[in-house]
Structures are given as C-alpha cells and as structure tokens.
Amino acid sequence: MSATERGLDMNGIAWLLVFAASLALAGLVVWRQEKRKARTLEEPRAKVRRKTKPVQQLLPIDHVRADGTLVLADGGMRKVLRVGNLNPYALSAAEAEGIRARFQTLLSTLREPFQIIVRGRRMDLSEYYTYFDALVEATAQKWENDRLLQYGRDLHRHLEERGEQQRTLRENLWVTSAHANWLSKSDEEVHQAVQHETETAFAGLMQCRVHPTLLGAEEAIEAQQQFLNRDKVHARARDAVRYDSLRGYYIGKEADALDTPTSF
C-alpha cells in the first residue's frame, strides 16, 4: 500500500470518528431534552411570584396605625380628610360672611402645619353599570319586552364609550399633621397632637358646611402617593390634557404648550 493510499484511509477513519462523535452528541442532547420534559410533566414548576415593592420604598411612610394614622419615616404623623364642595354663589351675603368668619376661626385654632390638596380621580362607573343592567333586565322581564332589554344593552355600550373619554372627578383633601420637634416628643404625644388637629379641623369644616369624612389607610396612602409623586404623568393627567380640560388653569406659554402635539 502506497503512502497516498494509507493517508486516504486515515482521513476516512478520522471523518468516520467525527461523524460517530456527532451522532453520539446529538443523541445525548435529545436524551437530556426528553428527560427534562418528563421531569416537567411529573413535577410542574411553581409559579414565579412577582416581587412587589413595599410602600416604604415609594413613600416616606414607615407604617400605618390601626386608626388610619400615617406614621412617616421622620417620626411625624398625618391624617387625611375628604372635604365636600360649597357653592358660594348659592349663598346669601350673610351666609357667605358667616362661613368666611368660621373658616378664619378654624385657621387660627390649628397649631400644626396642614395641607389642602385638590386632585382629580378617575370616575369609577362599574357599580352604576351593575345597577343599570339589573334594573333594565328586571323591568324588561316584568313587562316581557325584549325591545326594552335590547335598548338597555345598546345604552350600556353607549355609556361605556362615553366613559372612555374624559372622566376625572375633582376631590378636595385636608391633610393634618404633627411632627416631633426639638423637645423630642414621644410617639404617643405626636399621635395625640395629630388626633387633636384632626378633630379640630373636622369640627371647623363641619361648621363651614363642607361635610368632611376621614379617609381609611389605603385611600390616605393613595392621596400621599399622588401628591408626593405628582411629577409623574399618569392616565388621569393624559386624559385631562388630551381633552383640553386644563386650558383654563394655564396662562401664557403654558397655554400655548397645549397646542403642540404631544405623544404619550
């Protein structure tokens, strides 16, 4: 056998070995995949829970007391009241003057800082939709009127389409607060102070005929989130700008900015 033939035989053997190794490797990969599939079928993987950030990472709130008092990271405390509206044009001159005097008295009796927040909330019509559907269905069954039932369904769709447009509801909030000062008030003293400020504000606002109500923990935290993170554009702000309802609150260059195309 010549050297050339011997070299060709060696190359053939080498290629045969490479081919055999490739087949073995492919078989190993397929075997591992089948084994992994069998294990997955026998033991389903547990659902991965999404990690949620605690409120302490988003707001300067340490915890919430059982009575709804927000305890801040710096030791201060807050309570939030929802305040109703009052139309001054529906009052007589004497009534308006009396309410103005009572409001001045309220401001002079408060000892701690407070905040007045006017915010826009998305109007939730889900409960009304449920009530409307039940009423239409009951009436249609009572009178055995299929046309009335169909009319109610069409009207429901129309209401939903209208609801997708601008749907902001104004809400007035009064935030009472108390802080630990250089005299080093204890937690209980700070709590008593914010409780006293809240009771004083509640009584004074009742005399002003705006009917306050104390917010619970979740609503109070939401109010603080919207106030402290008000620089972030959210759905309500997009709706307000898109449907031009903020024009009355802007002047000069700010009003001109509403005319420029904006993408969200």
Image (cartoon, rainbow, N blue to C red):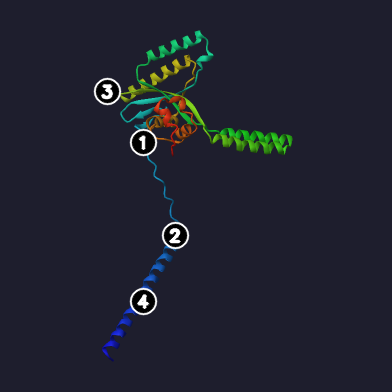
Q: Which residue is drawn at 36% across and 33% down?
A: 59
- Provide the secondary structure element on which disc 4 rests: helix
Q: Which of label 4 and label 1 is nearer to you?
A: 4
Q: Residue 184 carries which label?
A: 3
Report crowding for label 1: few under 14, some 14 to 19, many 20 or more residues within 10 A (C-alpha).
Answer: few
Place residue 237 in its image quadrant: top left
Q: Earlier in the sequence, mark 2 or mark 3?
A: 2
Q: Which of label 1 and label 2 is nearer to you?
A: 1
Per the model, the C-alpha gap separating discs 4 and 1 is 60 Å
Q: Which residue is drawn at 68% across and 37% down?
A: 149
Name the kind of residue labelled 2 in the image: Thr
Q: Which of label 3 and label 4 is nearer to you?
A: 4
Name the kind of residue labelled 4 in the image: Phe
The reply to whether discs 1 and 3 touch (Cβ–Cβ < 8 Å) is: no
Q: Position of residue 159 (x, y in %)?
A: 59, 35
Q: Earlier in the sequence, mark 1 or mark 3?
A: 1
Quadrant location of the N terminus in the rendered image: bottom left
The reply to whether discs 2 and 3 touch (Cβ–Cβ < 8 Å) is: no
Query: Which residue is disc 2 drawn over?
Result: 40
**Nearer to the camera, 11 or 198:** 11
Q: Which of marks 4 and 1 is nearer the N terminus?
A: 4
Q: Which of label 2 and label 4 is nearer to you?
A: 4
**Nearer to the camera, 105 or 245:** 245
- Provide the secondary structure element on which disc 1 rests: loop
- Provide the secondary structure element on which disc 3 rests: loop
Query: Which residue is disc 4 drawn over?
Result: 19
Per the model, the C-alpha gap separating discs 3 and 4 is 82 Å
Q: Which mark is residue 58?
A: 1
Name the kind of residue labelled 1 in the image: Leu
